[in-house]
Image: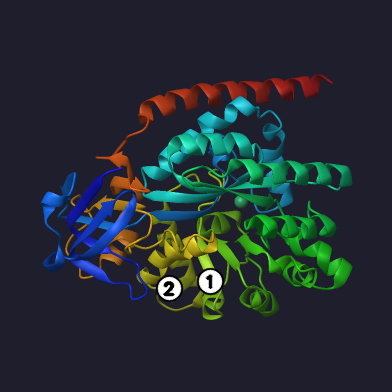
Amino acid sequence: MGSTLIHGATVLTVDAENTVHTDGWVAIRDGRIDGVGPQSTRPDTSGFDEVLHLPGHLAMPGLVNAHTHSVMVLFRGRSEGQSLLTMDGWYNSIREPELSLIASDIAPAVALSAAEMALSGTTTFCDQYFFAEEIAGAVKQSGLRAVIAYGIVQLGDEQRGKEELAKATAFLAQQRSADGRVIPWFGPHAPYVDNTEDLLVEEVKVANEYGVGLHLHMACGPEDNEETLSRYGTTASVALEKIGFFNGRIHAAHCLDLSAEDIAVFARAPNASISHNASAGLRSGREGICPVVELRAAGVTVALGTDNVAANNSYDMVAEMRVAGLVASHRERRAQPLSSQDLIRMATIEGAKALGLDHEIGSLEAGKAADIVAFDFSGPGYSETPDPETLLIYSGSGRDTRHLWVGGEMLVRDRQLMRRPYDAIRREYSATYQDFWRRVAEAKKTKEVA
Ligand SMILES: [Zn+2]
């Protein structure tokens, strides 16, 4: 795969000490980080296939988007005025059209989502949806790294639950990619709402056998706790802990309404994490806001995610860091309880940890996979400051991604995708979009006639 030396940039290592080299270097060799340091320790440029001198740039670990539904880019702008964190809002804006999705819609939609993510600094994402095989195929073509959680939806049908689990297990067995970039998981949509207790217990057992995790929605709508409160008098987290669910690797999205007891459940669990999707949560109009500061104080890993594009309209994780920072100040009623360094960690190493990948990605340290983004800080907004993290989060944009590597492979060079041009991806997507919404309209007409 060759070797590359990046130098002259401000390098955020996101190591345990948050070391920053204001005039630093990163060496990439055979897909891995070979070394990082200040200019005084830079190796000779002659030993590299490519040398990129990047003054006025910020080089850092690629961003980790810890909660997405990449197919749902097809629903961009289609649920305005609806809360996607309630059953009603989801049903009214998403459920009906979703029934018109066919397998051939998936790859063009995922390709566009992956392109938008790569072009805004994201190297890894955690996706959950049905059509998991098609998603995995499209992600492999994009070159990005992703956990893909097979969406298990039971809807009160025991037989369907069994069949879904068998299919999801086959997905685990078959989809791990040779280069390790695609990692299959289970994705029970939401516990109790559409996955029964027995099925959840079985899912954890199988996931542990395969050494993978479960990605699900928790405590995002009033429905999430209603069922368990009426049946057992406890919240979903507490009920799930009792049945051994938290013995698995559990990565939960949203978590807007968590009691002190729920936070303790997450803190006690060996491998539980949360994806805080600040934009999607705010947009829903729910009163609850994920208690990030308390969770972190209790030792819980909290990552950041955009959620689906209908609930956010953007994959820009730099914007997501900004919103997460602002909403934490508002919730805690004090200035910046989450520092810019905290937010950078949540969008990189904490995201990696949530996905069980922190030994491999999430920081620029020798031996890790070379998942790196270089932001161009030469444009408007990026004036002098002693604080590069704040400059990126509160003054910058993911769209200033100039170069991006996954596993040492340059996927973005000079703002252009390397594997397949953005224009081609966009053309194919637009044709799919037109076709999909034409089918949705036809299905609606047929239903009305009937
Ligand atoms: Zn979601």
Res. 338 mark: 2
Residue at image coords 62%, 61%: 252
Res. 292 mark: 1
- Residue type marked 2: Leu
Q: How is the image coloured?
A: rainbow
Please say if 349 is above or below 400.
below
Residues at marks 1 and 2, CA–CA distance in whole angstroms: 9 Å
Seen in the image, is 52 located left or right of residue 247? Answer: left
The quadrant holding residue 43 is bottom left
Mark 2 neighbour class, 10 Å CA radius: few under 14, some 14 to 19, many 20 or more: many
Seen in the image, is 136 located left or right of residue 397? Answer: right
Of residue 149 and residue 57, the one placed in the foreground of this image is 149
The quadrant holding residue 291 is bottom right
Percent of width and height locating residue 133: 62, 36
Q: Is residue 75 visible?
A: no
Secondary-structure class at tag 2: loop
- Quadrant for the N terminus, please: top left
Q: Is residue 59 visible?
A: yes
Mark 1 neighbour class, 10 Å CA radius: few under 14, some 14 to 19, many 20 or more: many
Ligand 1 contact, mark 1 (Cβ < 8 Å): no
Residue at image coords 38%, 48%: 407
Q: Are marks 1 and 2 in contact (CB under 8 Å)?
A: yes
Percent of width and height locating residue 194: 78, 51
Work out whether mark 1 precedes mark 2 in sequence or the reverse, and give the earlier one.
1
- Residue type marked 1: Val
Residue at image coords 86%, 48%: 156
Percent of width and height locating residue 184: 60, 48
Res. 335 mark: none
